Amino acid sequence: MTKKIIIACILIIVVLGAIVFGAAWHFSNQLINPKPYTCQVDHFVYCGGISELTIPYQDIEFTNDAKLTLRGWFVPANSKKAIVMVHGITADRREGLRWVKALHNAGYNLLLFDLRNHGKSDKAKTGMGYYEKDDVIAAVNFLQSKGFTSIGVFGVSMGASTAIQAMAKDERIKAGVFEAAFANLGDLLSEIAKRDFGLPRFPIINAVMWVYSMRLGADAHAINPEDFIGSISPRPVFVIHCDGDNYIAYHHGQRIFANAKEPKLMWTAHCNMHARAWQSNPMEAEKRVVDFYNKYM
C-alpha cells in the first residue's frame, strides 16, 4: 500500500510539473512571438497610417547590431533636434502618430519605426526590451548619421520600458518621455496571471520567467526598468501613467518615478485604459510633452 501511495505521489508530481511547464511554455510564447495588435482608433487614433496626418514624411530603413532591418517613417523638420518614437508589444509605429503633429509643429524631426518582430521590420524573438533597446540605439545611430545632434526618445508601454533601458545604455539620448511602462516584468506577469486567469505567482510565473529566459537566451529578470532608470541622471526623464491603467497598473509608473533621479517629472493622467494619456486631454498632454522637450533639448 505504501509503495502504491509513493508511486501515485510521483505521478501526481510529474503531471503537475508537466502542466506547469506546459503553461509556462504557452505564456512565454506570447512574449517571444506576440500576435499583431488589431488597430483601434480609440488607441492609435490614426490607424490608416501617417498619410492621415497630411505632413511630409519619408519611408526609411536601417539595420541594428543583429543585422536585422528595421523599417519606419521619418518626419523632417527644420532643426537638428530629433525624437525616436518607440511602440509597445504587439503594436507598431502607428502607436506614436497621435503625438506627431504637436512635436512636429514644435520643430522636432521624428523617427517612428517598427521594433524587431513587429510591423514591417524583420522577424526575431521579442525580448520585452532586452534586445529591443539595441533597436532604439540603432535608430539613434541612424539619426546621428544624418547630422542630428540633439536626440530624445518617447516610448509607450513595452516601448517605454525599452526606451528606459536604451537611454541608460546610450548617453547620446538627451531626454526621455516614458508612458505606461512596466517597472518589473515578473510583477507585471503575476498581476496579469491573477487578473485574467486567477493563477498564483508560484509556481506558474516563476516557471514562465525561467522558460522565457531559456528560450530568450537572456535573463528575464534583467529587463526591469526600475533597475535602470536611476542611472540615466543627470539627463531628464518624464514619466506618464494613467491612474486607472487597466493593463499595466499605476503603481508601475510610481515605482519607476521613485527610482529615477533628478531631473525628473511625472504626470498622472486621469484615464482608465492602458496608455491613453493623450486621449485623456490632448491639449494638456501635448503641452506637457512639448514643454518638457523644449526645456531639456
Image (cartoon, grey):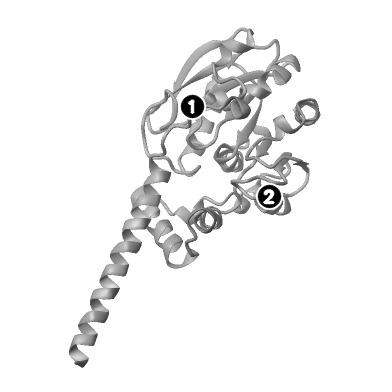
The kind of residue tagged 2 is Tyr
Q: Residue 5 is drawn in which quadrant?
A: bottom left
Give the percent coordinates (x, y) of residue 41: 59, 24
- Answer whether residue 224 is visible to the viewer in this image: yes
Q: Quadrant of the N terminus?
A: bottom left
Name the secondary structure under disc 1. Answer: loop
Q: In the image, is 182 to the left or to the right of 278?
A: left
Q: Residue 35 is drawn in which quadrant?
A: top left
Name the secondary structure under disc 2. Answer: helix
Q: In the image, is 167 to the left or to the right of 8?
A: right
The earlier-in-sequence mark between 1 and 2 is 1
Looking at the rendered structure, which numbered label has been put on residue 274?
Answer: none
**Residue to which mark 2 is pinned:** 250
Residue 207, placed above or below residue 241: below
Give the percent coordinates (x, y) of residue 262: 77, 46
**Residue to which mark 1 is pinned:** 114
Give the percent coordinates (x, y) of residue 181: 62, 44
Foreground residue among 11 and 161: 11
